[in-house]
Amino acid sequence: MSVKQLKENKRTKDGRSWVFIQYSKSLDGKRHQYQSQAYMTEEEAIQAEKIYLNKYKDVEVNPHMTFKEAYTIYCDYQKNKIKDSTLKTYRDRIKYMGLLDNVELVNLNWDLYQKWRAQINKTNLCDRYKTDIQKFIKQVINFAEKQWDFNLRKFYNKLEPFKTPGALKKEMDFYEPEEFFKFISVVDDLRYKCFFELLYYCGLRRSEARGLQWKHIDFNNKTLTVSQQVLNPSNSNASTEWYISSTKTEASNRTIPISTTLLNDLAELKKTNERLSKFKQT
């Protein structure tokens, strides 16, 4: 029995003197003591302890872990397992977690979730992006359940996609062939012309087009191979943080046929680069 009565000098002004005490281990292995609030009778303290034990049962480490503590550990755990771009996405999501930061994992509930949703709904973000932000909560919950045996399924199952009633689905903006031809006809820098043609004719992401090297272009077979991308964590053209990374997913590695127009422009660009390279060497 971990219920005890406090000494007279420790009792509350209204006479509450019964508490229960529980011990747990933190992630550093140290033993921590938790003392409940004071109750008027021993029976009240016993009942409160039963509720407490049921709430925190099976948790292997600090049962009072907050959501912020959990996602901080999660991000650190993932640091060497995911791309820098994904880690940046996690950091972007964290700024929307303020309302949940200091909430103990076991105290995540429907009311808190509704308050968080109401807060996110005040932003100008689209429903799809808000749902993506919410995925971070799911990832942290799954991690906490797997690593420390928290039982958070009831809360997890309450998370639902954002859907604004009557909201019009955002239409994809794309060029019709006539519009693209009109646009590309006024691009007089061959580098940019090839870049835009790679996006239009081959369906490449901008990061994939930036990652192309001449070794990825097969002029004989009229194909190009996508096997890497160039990213910038800050998404700023002025940034110097550009770096080469593998493609977004394994399925993104692919070989794509090249149209004659693009092939000719790439060949001309390669010749221009070779001439400039020889000029600099002389």
Image (cartoon, rainbow, N blue to C red):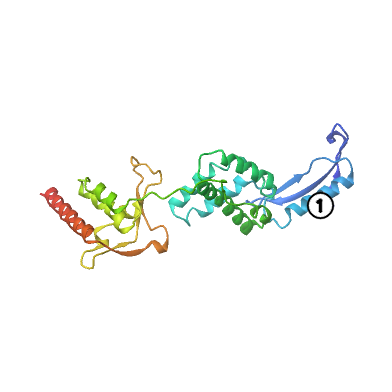
Q: Residue furthest left?
A: 282
Asked if residue 140 shows in the view, the reply is yes
Foreground: 172 or 79?
A: 172
Counting the numbered discs, the total is 1
Where in the figure is residue 150, as x and y percent of width and height?
67, 55
Residue at x 59%, y 39% (from the top left corner):
119
Q: Is residue 102 visible?
A: no
- Residue at 15% across / 55% down in the picture? 271
Name of the residue lying farthest toward the top? 13
Q: Is residue 117 left or right of residue 32?
A: left
Nearest the eye: 31 or 52: 52
Q: Few, some or many C-alpha atoms within 10 Å of disc 1 (few <14, some 14-19, many ≥20)?
A: few
The amino acid type found where label 1 is placed reads Lys
Residue 3: x percent and y percent? Answer: 84, 48
Residue shown at 36% from the left, 54% from the top: 205
In terms of image quadrants, where is residue 249? bottom left
Q: Measuring from the top left, give residue 153's x and y in whole percent.
A: 66, 56
Q: On the rendered structure, is 90 left or right of 232?
A: right
**Residue ID for mark 1:** 50
Q: Is residue 193 left or right of residue 27?
A: left
Q: Residue furthest bottom?
A: 221
* Of residues 273 and 163, the one drawn nearer to the viewer in this rendering: 163
